[in-house]
Image (tube, grey):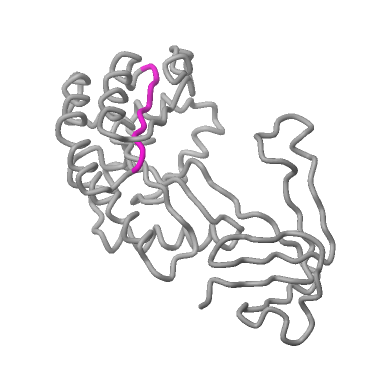
Amino acid sequence: MTENLIIFNARVVTPIGFSARCGKEMGELCIIDNATIEVTDGIISYVGPSRGEMRDGYYQRYWHYNARGKCLLPGFVDSHTHFVFGGERAEEFSWRLKGESYMSIMERGGGIVSTVKATRECSFIQLRSKAEGFLKQMSSMGVTTVEGKSGYGLDKETELLQLKVMRSLNNDEHKRVDIVSTFLGAHALPPEYTGREDEYINFLIHEMLPIIRQNELAECCDVFCEQGVFSIEQSRRLLTAARDQGFLLKLHADEIVSLGGAELAA
């Protein structure tokens, strides 16, 4: 289909300005009735009041769509997702309702470790099919871009498999959602590395990062900097190495215990 598009007879609802909004400013919106959105060569070239697009022959090189007064919003960006994984953890909701903490669930074999076991047992087709279903749901809710994190493999084969699934979906000519991939091999300590946290960080730095970079499987690198997971210094080592190899950086910081993760991020 042509990349030239005109959507007319729409009610446009969009944020004001070009900077981040906070507090009451987040409720300040620009609303334009009977509005037109023009896209030229794939780029939005006009948003504003109608300019007579309903006339015959107006902009013949453009595909026209009559919104019939419906609301038109900017696409949503979901900036933190794990949509490639195996298994389910629905029972953990009841555990949390009974007062169990996130970390106590992890300690009893639930949480991340539970999903790692299920994900390692999945094939590429199984992971891709499930992930594609999630993307369709997101798209139906207005999401146009997601950040997808790995982190449910915690071994070489499965971490690469998760990232390859994301690349495959991102390269699909029929995709509806853009994917920004993040390598989160440091999501938890895998059972086979119990008591050897530093060795695992070395494995991520020396074996995983070069392969992922060479094959362009991820744009970003993340780490779960948390008590009982990875320390400030371990997180610093991994992120410094990732930055040196050209990755953009992300950080799970002070999610449960204030260790100084926010300061490390800064």
Residue 152: x, y in percent?
Answer: 31, 42
- Decide if residue 95 is on the left or right side of residue 71: left
Residue at the right extreme, as displayed: 33
Magenta region, main secondary structure: strand
- The residue located at (47%, 46%) in the rendering is 90
Residue 136: x, y in percent?
Answer: 50, 63
Q: Is residue 196 above or below residue 152?
A: above
Q: Is residue 76 above or below residue 41?
A: above
- The residue located at (48%, 41%) in the rendering is 80
Q: Tell me if residue 117 is in the magenta stretch.
A: no
Boundaries of the magenta span: 219-227
Q: Tell me if residue 226 is in the magenta stretch.
A: yes
- Along the viewing direction, whichever of 175 and 196 lies nearer the viewer: 175
Residue 70: x, y in percent?
Answer: 77, 67
- Along the viewing direction, whichever of 130 and 181 lies nearer the viewer: 181
- Decide if residue 122 is on the left or right side of residue 14: left
- Along the viewing direction, whichever of 260 and 88 lies nearer the viewer: 260
